[in-house]
Image: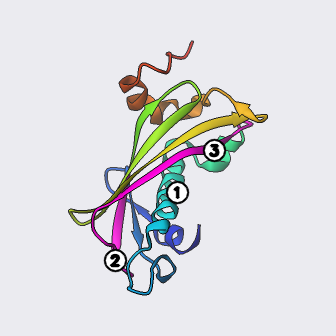
Amino acid sequence: MGDAAAERGRDADGQGFSVRIAPRYCDAQGMVHASRYYELFEDAFLAWLDHACGGYLALQATGGDLVIIENGCTYRHPARQNDRVTIDVDPVWASKSSFCVAFRVRRDQIEIADGRSTYVFVQNGASAPIPALLDPALADATARSPRRPAREP
């Protein structure tokens, strides 16, 4: 996805994704515009999916798609053009057909912003069980959430 995707790389822990802030994300003051953090979150989420299940196309090959049903962001410090930031991606909870991911944007040890996105898996226009290929990536979130029953063997 654009400049950010071309410049991203995974941190050593496998959870963070490094992005150089491109000019298109910035306002006239040279700071990332508030609305652009959602694009950065999505880029990081797509990179997380690459690591978690082989990517977005692998997920779509199961016959469904993910739809964002809720987003939020809290801004703490500005990020500026050409800054290299890391976006940590952490699944927070999971249910049978939906899950929530937390994002933390940081420059070195300075927290820039944090956000949350809730996704629902959809097939044929209705919510459907999350595909098993995401089970390993959502295992910790599932353990923290009594909402999703264990999968039958």
Q: Kindly identify which residue carries mark 1.
A: 42
- The Cα atoms of the two marked residues, 2 and 3, are separated by 30 Å
Q: Amino acid at mark 3?
A: Val
Mark 1 surroundings: few (<14), some (14-19) or many (≥20) residues within 10 A: some
Q: Is residue 151 above or below residue 58?
A: above
- Could you tell me which secondary element the residue under label 1 belongs to? helix
Q: Please say if the residues under marks 1 and 3 sit with CB atoms less than 8 Å apart.
A: no
Q: Could you tell me how far apart the alpha carbons at marks 1 and 3 are, in whole angstroms?
A: 12 Å
Q: Residues within 10 Å of mark 2 (few under 14, many from 20)?
A: some
Amino acid on which the number 1 mark rests in the picture: Glu
- Figure quadrant of the N terminus: bottom right
Tell me, yes or no, whether the two marked residues, 2 and 3, touch with CB atoms within 8 Å: no
- Residue that badge 2 annotates: 83
Residue at image point 49% right, 68% down: 36
Q: Residue at x 28, y 63 (%)?
A: 76
Corner quadrant of residue 86: bottom left
> Which residue is denoted by mark 3 in the rendering?
67
Dot in front, 2 or 3? 3
Question: Could you say where residue 148 lies in the image, as x and y percent from the top left?
Answer: 49, 21
Q: Secondary structure at mark 2?
A: loop
Expressed as whole percent of the image width and height from the top left, the position of residue 59 reads 64, 42
State the extent of the magenta-drawn residues as a range.
62-88
- Left or right: residue 132 compared with residue 21: right
Q: Secondary structure at mark 3?
A: strand
